[in-house]
Image (cartoon, grey):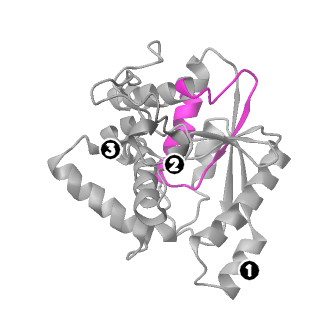
Amino acid sequence: MNLELEKAILRRVGEAVARFGMIREGDRVAVGFSGGKDSFTLLSALLLLQKRAPVRFEVRAFTIDQGKFLGPVEPFRDWMREHGVEWVYRADGPSLRLLDEQPDHGCDLCSRFRRRAVYALAREMGANVIALGHTADDFCESLLRNALFTGRLAALPPVIWSRKREFRLIRPLVYVTEDLTRAWAEACGAPVIPCGCSQKTGTVRRSLRDFLAELEKDYPHVKSTLLNAMGNVEPGRLLDARHFDFETAEEEGARSAPLPLLDEPAFTDL
């Protein structure tokens, strides 16, 4: 195992958990596991963090099969057993029927079906926290997608409550880029199972992903810069009058101090 890679991932996950208060004493965390490199890295990191964090919490895993996996997830069963992870695999009937009846349905409808299935399964597992495997790449793409196509400055929230406040949803990989999750899966020899949706071309998500990849050739830290920008918002220098104080607005240069950059670790004992 590459210890430097493990340290890099754990430091970033630890910083996210600490900065946004993602995991608390006694939490029962259910990790959404799709068999892809991101969810595998998330589960691995939380299991490692569980041994070192100053709070006690449980880690479980679940898989919702909506009929879009490009291979069987079953090969991970031995890995789960070896690491002592309680894992629940569930084929979602309504999603499978949707796939048959409306094969060209959009992501929004699929997401609603998945959310319903996830909450039902998390409830069954006795979890109060649901961990999702969205990475730094997803946060950057979400910011650009909202700004360019919906007219909003918004991205994915690192922590959010379900509508009825039954579950706390967390995204501990917010500072972990996909080059790290890819390297981690390869280092572990994980039998990564891609989802058919990730192979689609001609989508806004694919266009933004390709745009960022091209930009990174000349500006390798562009994703880190975008992430820092999301944590260093200056509402008075935007156009939303709800957040603009006309009486106290100051000239260029009179700005508040930014949050610490991501290079400054929060969990120095990891």
Q: For the point 41% across and 69% down, which residue is it?
A: 204
Whether the residues at callouts 3 and 1 have beta carbons within 8 Å, the answer is: no
Q: For the point 43% across and 48% down, which residue is it?
A: 239
In which quadrant of the rendered image does the N terminus lie?
Answer: top left
Whether the residues at callouts 2 and 1 have beta carbons within 8 Å, the answer is: no
Whether the residues at callouts 3 and 2 have beta carbons within 8 Å, the answer is: no
Name the residue tied to disc 2: 134
Q: Secondary structure beneath disc 1? A: helix
Name the residue tied to disc 3: 223
| Residue 31 image point, x, y percent | 64, 43
First in sequence, mark 3 or 1: give its number. 1
Q: Residue furthest front?
A: 247
Residue neighbourhood size for the residue with mark 2, other residues' Cα within 10 Å, grouped as few (<14), some (14–19), many (≥20): many
Front: mark 2 or 1: 2
Q: Nearer the viewer, residue 81 or 95?
A: 95
Front: mark 3 or 1: 3
Which segment did they paint magenta? 19-48
Q: For the point 71% across and 58% down, which residue is it?
A: 115
Along the horizontal axis of the image, is 101 left or right of 14? right
Instruction: Name the residue type under label 1.
Output: Arg
Q: Quadrant of residue 6?
A: top left
Instruction: Name the residue type under label 2.
Output: His
Q: Quadrant of residue 167?
A: top right
Residue neighbourhood size for the residue with mark 1, other residues' Cα within 10 Å, grouped as few (<14), some (14–19), many (≥20): few
Name the residue tied to disc 1: 97
- Callout count: 3
Q: Nearer the viewer, residue 214 or 85?
A: 214
Q: CA distance from mark 3 to mark 2?
A: 14 Å
Front: mark 3 or 2: 3
Instruction: Name the residue type under label 3.
Output: Lys
| Residue 50 image point, x, y percent | 61, 25
